[in-house]
Amino acid sequence: MTTPLAPAATHRTLPASVYISGAWTIFGIMHGVVWTASSDDPSSAVRWAMPTALAVAWAWALITPLVFRLTRAGAPSRIGWGRSLFLHAGAMLLCVAFMTWWRHVVLAALTERYTPSFLPDFLFWFDVWLFVYATLVVVGHALSVRRRYVDRTVRAHLLEAQLARARLQFLELQLQPHFLFNALNAIQELAHEAPQAAERMLRKLHTLLDISLQRSGQDEVTLQEELQALEPYIDIQKTRFSDWLDVEMCVPADVRDALVPHLILQPLVENAIRHGLSVRPAAGRVTIRAERQGDRLLLRVEDNGVGLRPPSSRSSAREGIGLRNASERLRQLYGASHHFELRDAPAGGVVVELDIPYRDAGSAGTSAPLSASGELHIPADALQDLSNWHTGEYSAGFVVPETPMRGPSIASEAAPAPARLVDGGRGTRVRYDTPTPADPSAASAASLSPAPALTGRNWFIILGLWVALAVMWTSQMVLYTQTRMSGEWKVPWVALARLQFATSVIWLALSPIVFALARQFRIDSANWMRTMPLHIVFGMATGFLHTSLMRLTGLSEMPVLSPVNLNPLIGDFFVYFGLLAWSHARDFVAWYRVRELEGARLSARIAGSRFQSLRVQLRPHFLLSTLDLLADLVHRDVPRAERLIARLADTLRLTLESGRDSTTSIRQELELLQVCVETHRLGIRPHVRLVASVAPEALSLQVPSRLLCTIADDLLAPDVLNPGSPLTVRVEVQRASDATRIHIRAEREGWDEEGGARTRAGKTAGGGGDPATGRRSTRSIGERHMWWRTKSVAEAAVADAGSLVSVVFPDRMTAVLIIADAPARDGSHVSASLVGAVA
């Protein structure tokens, strides 16, 4: 099952201040322990070393949030590298001065033997406080980048859910013209012979379409609702075949609340009747069964028809649009957690078996169905508009299940589930397979891309950094000895340089080890309690290893645990965590870029899926009104009813054909538009005509499929213009040097407002209103044609058609489509403007 995004309130997290103070308290205790152990008199040092260490740590805890804010505000991406470095240099010097002063204040209050000397101590602790500040900056940057990466991960999940929903919408819309086309062919046969039966079928068809529209957008409904939606279709088939068809439902009451995909049974029953029973010489029977088996719901549609033929013939699989549609919808909803199979029944006929997770309506609010590959399913209200999405918006409102932080990978789009013919012991089977990994979590971890490796440029920068630090350390210690020591106690600068350069060499050798540990023990919110103690131990170990190597090589005569080595031990600890944070930040930056690319690809696929839905979308109000009219015409004007049914069937057929391709020629688009206009003229709008003005050379130009029809459909909708008034839809196509211009205009040739006088509106923008005053009526075409003023079907279609398509509205009755030519690689333009641009 897919884990839904849960409200953040259900996962209580501690404030960031608690984590910051806790981390610094742990450091203060460690600092105090090492300080006490390295003292000449540990028993007396414990009284002042531990309090001082905690006081210093807690002071850094107060400074840490300020450094994090400064890191975000002074990011180079915001203010530039020069200003950012200058800002942090000033802040770092303030922190060094403040911490030196604060340490003096605490030590002076706790021990009488301490005599403060600000400048020498400032120079002695300069590198340590510098490393602490730099580590905080890198940690703040890593946390900021990680937050952006997590936000983009949430965005990717949202887009994946949007894509799954767009695909489901297309699959649901695809069923409508396919089913209506078959039903109208059956009704046309009865129009002459049995008008009463034809009317009854039309009324049932109207009811079925109305139910489908009411539940449009619902991925799942209860089995009871699905059976109720199936009843009108069964009545249509029984009316058509009279006593020839028997449908039996064996569905216990205790499973009728189970959730099933919307309109999943209708194509299965249709497939059984058309391919199994229609060629049977005797009466046929279809049985629908449902039962619960543990946490699974088993649905069967059985018929006693001709059965499946041997697997030598692919056509015997009875794999039409309905079965392919059902298989793809199941894959989108449940991923690998479903089974869909056709097989020969033991007693003859075919069994269609569907096995899905059992979930009842009461549990729908706590769980969600799977999307295509087990991604998150998210409430629809969170999917509407991501254009104003900002970092942190969703991370504050949702909790995303963590995955091992090894880096994301762009999941390839799963191919439609293939149908396989299997000649088994019980006869021929058609199995729709969805690949199932043996271990989903292992498969997910295996697909994660590794963190980016360090390049030669990175190592060159690291080498330069350690050389610069060696120079800084040498200068620092020379200044320190000049201010603190005198005479024979001064150390030669050559010896100091040798000591500091040796430190840089040691850390240059340790850096690959630190980066390897960072990759091996990645810190994330799921494992930080396990990995953080390991890194604390590693950080302390690097400090002791450094001081031990210095002593073993003779470069230092100080014992490892000595007050003098307290400075390098603390510095080494923060150098380790600085490198650790930089490694994490670098990985998150790379993964963030992958998520950005993934989001762009998902957005393009969502637009493609939405446009694919547009290509098979039918105007529901037009269909319902036409079916009502047909139910009346079969009694009083059968010839007109037959012509209307034929034209409506042509519209459905062309809709299905145009839905296969993302682009079509202007010639084919005008043919479909002409059929749509004729359907309206024979049906609910008798006074409509299409006038097209297209140059012959422009007829072969490619445009997005059904885009012209989408805009013209709104002009022909009965709730936009008075259906009784004459209406002319004019389409003009013109070619420019690098674009195609399509001008679509609605021209009213008369208007009768509540019995008033008819006026000539012609080409007057807006028109209508009071003929005596000439003022525009509040119920004019422009006022009621608000889809041209808001982002509705037409504008959404243009937005989804691709970046080369735009629309402008010179007035409220005119739309102008501008389709730019796709640029060629040589900088010229391709005249077939949108070939491949929309896909």
Image (cartoon, grey):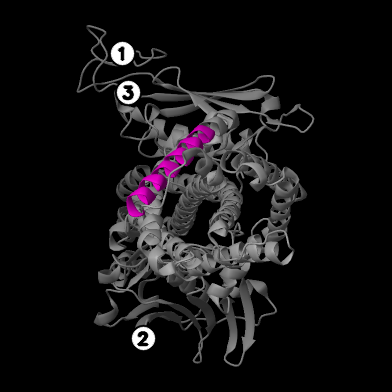
Q: Secondary structure at mark 3?
A: helix
CA gap, disc 2 to disc 3? 58 Å
Q: Secondary structure at mark 2?
A: loop
- Which label sits in the foreground, 1 or 3? 3
Q: Which residue is mark 3?
A: 781
Span shown in magenta? 88-111
- Near-viewer residue (486 or 639): 486
Q: Secondary structure at mark 1?
A: loop
The amino acid type, in three-letter code, at marker 2 is: Gly
**Mark drawn on residue 294:** 2
Residue 619 horizontal/vertical position (percent): 40, 43
Q: Which residue is mark 1?
A: 759
Looking at the image, is 577 positioned above or below residue 636?
A: below
Instruction: Kindly indicate the quadrant of the structure image that contains residue 423.
Output: bottom right
- Which label sits in the foreground, 2 or 1? 2
Residue farthest toward the top in the current orientation of the protein:
773
